[in-house]
Image (cartoon, rainbow, N blue to C red):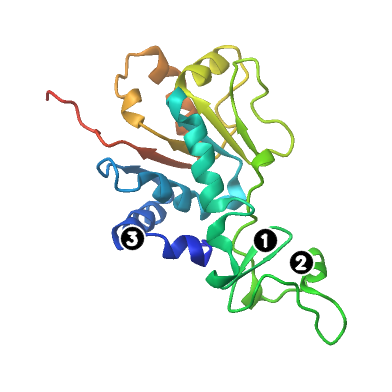
């Protein structure tokens, strides 16, 4: 599924089970683990499996926007400590290759190094990259409903529920724009008659992959 080895090894067994479950049902899942059990890393890892379908959209409470940026950069960011040499991965032009070699480009007998082979597609299947790591500049944290939803070069967009609602109303965010969506604190969409739910659910219905997170997936009173 293209998950880099350092990220895969960071998952606890039950977290790997959560990721596998999301993949088994084609990336449309609700993760209802209790608070503190690592729903964030499970959601991020699940979406790595569908990286070719990005850009990725994250809905979350307003106060969690920069936490999500931090977590994504920690697990998938250029320069993250989990991708150092001791973890036996090779990084060429921000592409992660699992293996037993260090991060320095190697040159073969023909004098062509791995960086050139990435550009020309000459790396063989045993060296297929897992994912291209994210630069901070490729993550767009929305701060105003007047922001462009998807500027050029952005691979991840993070929006609060309030901003998303406003951007849908003004036509800047439309169903079908994103195929991969993470919905943090998804119980905020539990009221089917609320304006927020009515506006955001069509975005989720049009997306191919949706991972919803909630530590309280059921009503307090049945």
In three-dimensional space, the C-alpha distance between marks 1 and 2, rounded to whole angstroms, equals: 9 Å
- Seen from the viewer's position, the closer of residues 158 and 209 is 158
In three-dimensional space, the C-alpha distance between marks 2 and 3, rounded to whole angstroms, equals: 32 Å
When the figure is inspected, residue 103 is found, relative to residue 209, above or below; the finding is: below
In three-dimensional space, the C-alpha distance between marks 3 and 1, rounded to whole angstroms, equals: 25 Å
Label 2, residues with CA under 10 Å away: few <14, some 14-19, many ≥20: some
- Is residue 206 something that shows in the picture? no
The answer to the question of whether label 1 and label 2 lie on touching residues, with beta carbons closer than 8 A, is yes
User: Mark 2 or mark 1, which is nearer the start of the sequence?
Assistant: 1
Q: Is residue 103 left or right of residue 38?
A: right
Query: At numbered mark 3, what does the secondary structure look like: helix, strand or loop?
Result: loop
Q: Is residue 199 left or right of residue 106?
A: left
When the figure is inspected, residue 172 is found, relative to residue 36, above or below; the finding is: above
Please tell me in which quadrant of the rendered image residue 88 appears.
bottom right
Residue pictured at 32% horizontal, 44% vertical: 31
Label 1, residues with CA under 10 Å away: few <14, some 14-19, many ≥20: some
Q: Which residue is mark 1?
A: 95
Residue pictured at 29% horizontal, 58% vertical: 14
Q: Which residue is mark 2?
A: 118
At which x and y percent is residue 151? 71, 31
Q: Which callout, 1 or 2, points to the residue nearer the camera?
A: 1
Query: At numbered mark 1, what does the secondary structure look like: helix, strand or loop?
Result: strand
Query: At numbered mark 2, what does the secondary structure look like: helix, strand or loop?
Result: helix
At which x and y percent is residue 150? 66, 30
Residue pictured at 64% horizontal, 53% vertical: 78
């Amino acid at each position: 599924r293209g998950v880099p080895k350092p990220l895969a090894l960071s998952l606890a067994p039950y977290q790997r089970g959560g990721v596998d479950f999301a993949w088994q049902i084609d990336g449309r899942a609700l993760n209802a683990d209790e608070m503190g059990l690592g729903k964030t890393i499970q959601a991020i890892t699940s979406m790595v499996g569908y990286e070719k379908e990005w850009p990725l959209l994250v809905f979350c409470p307003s106060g969690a926007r920069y936490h999500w940026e931090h977590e994504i950069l920690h697990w998938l960011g250029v320069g993250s400590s989990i991708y150092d040499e001791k973890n036996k991965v090779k990084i060429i032009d921000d592409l992660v290759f699992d293996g037993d070699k260090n991060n320095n480009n190697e040159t073969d007998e023909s004098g062509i190094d791995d960086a050139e082979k990435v550009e020309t597609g000459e790396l063989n299947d045993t060296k297929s990259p897992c994912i291209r790591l994210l630069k901070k500049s490729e993550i767009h944290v929305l701060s105003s409903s007047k922001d462009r939803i998807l500027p050029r070069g952005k691979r991840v967009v993070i929006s609060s529920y309030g901003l998303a609602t406003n951007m849908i109303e003004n036509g800047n965010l439309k169903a079908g724009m994103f195929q991969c969506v993470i919905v943090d604190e998804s119980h905020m969409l539990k009221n089917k008659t609320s304006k927020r739910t009515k506006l955001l659910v069509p975005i989720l219905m049009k997306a191919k992959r949706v991972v919803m997170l909630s530590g309280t997936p059921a009503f307090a009173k049945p």
